[in-house]
Image (cartoon, rainbow, N blue to C red):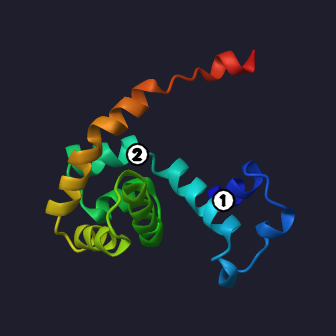
Amino acid sequence: MCHELGHFVLGHSGKYFTELRGKSDSVKEREANIFSATVLMPDIVLLSKIFYRQDSFQKVKNDLAVSQEALIYRLINLFNHYFFDKESKIKDVVYDYYYGFNQRILFYFEKMSKSIIKEYKATKCNIYDRML
């Protein structure tokens, strides 16, 4: 549902709401995937669960009620945003985490933790002010 909401919020035409899974490589599908993954798994939440609490892949997936594919996609996208490593190296880090080897993912989160916290603290939004 969040993916479909992403199409709406991003202003995609109505045809994307009914598009079959086979066409998921389009730019608009990727945008909706990124939107939904970011909404369901914010950077600060992933930092807390993976770096500080050192939750397993399965626990994070279950706690956030997302699919395995969605969590893998989100972590790859997150690391691509913060690092300029080759995507194959980033995928290796994420798959290590999936298989229970946490060392490299903890190192990545340590390198970007200050940036995530700074961005989180800089975000000030009072939903009640916007309603008035």
Q: Residue at x 29, y 64 (%)?
A: 57
Q: Position of residue 114 (x, y in %)?
A: 28, 36
Q: Amino acid at mark 1?
A: Met
Q: Position of residue 27 (x, y in %)?
A: 67, 68
Q: Residue at x 73, y 51 (%)?
A: 10
Q: Position of residue 82 (x, y in %)?
A: 37, 51
Report the side of 99 relative to 70 (left or right).
left
Q: Residue at x 46, y 58 (%)?
A: 65
Report the side of 6 relative to 17 (left or right).
left
Q: Badge 1, how many Cα within 10 Å: few under 14, some, many 20+?
A: few
The residues bearing labels 1 and 2 have C-alpha atoms spaced at a distance of: 20 Å
Total marks in image: 2
Q: Please tell me whether residue 93 is drawn above or below residue 7 in the rendered image.
A: below
Instruction: Please tell me whether mark 1 or mark 2 is closer to you in this view.
Output: 2
Q: Residue furthest bottom?
A: 22
Secondary structure at badge 1 equals: loop
Question: Quadrant of the image for the C terminus?
Answer: top right
Question: Quadrant of the image for the N terminus?
Answer: bottom right
Front residue of 110 and 83: 83
Q: Give the numbered dot on residue 1.
A: 1
Q: Badge 2, how many Cα within 10 Å: few under 14, some, many 20+?
A: some
> Does label 1 or label 2 sit earlier along the sequence?
1
Residue on which disc 2 sits: 43
Secondary structure at badge 2 equals: helix
Front residue of 114 and 52: 114
Q: Residue at x 38, y 60 (%)?
A: 75
Query: Which quarter of the picture shows residue 26?
Result: bottom right
Q: Amino acid at mark 2?
A: Asp
Front residue of 75 and 48: 75
CB within 8 Å, label 1 to label 2: no
Report the side of 103 relative to 67 (left or right).
left
Q: Please tell me whether residue 9 is drawn above or below residue 85 in the rendered image.
A: above
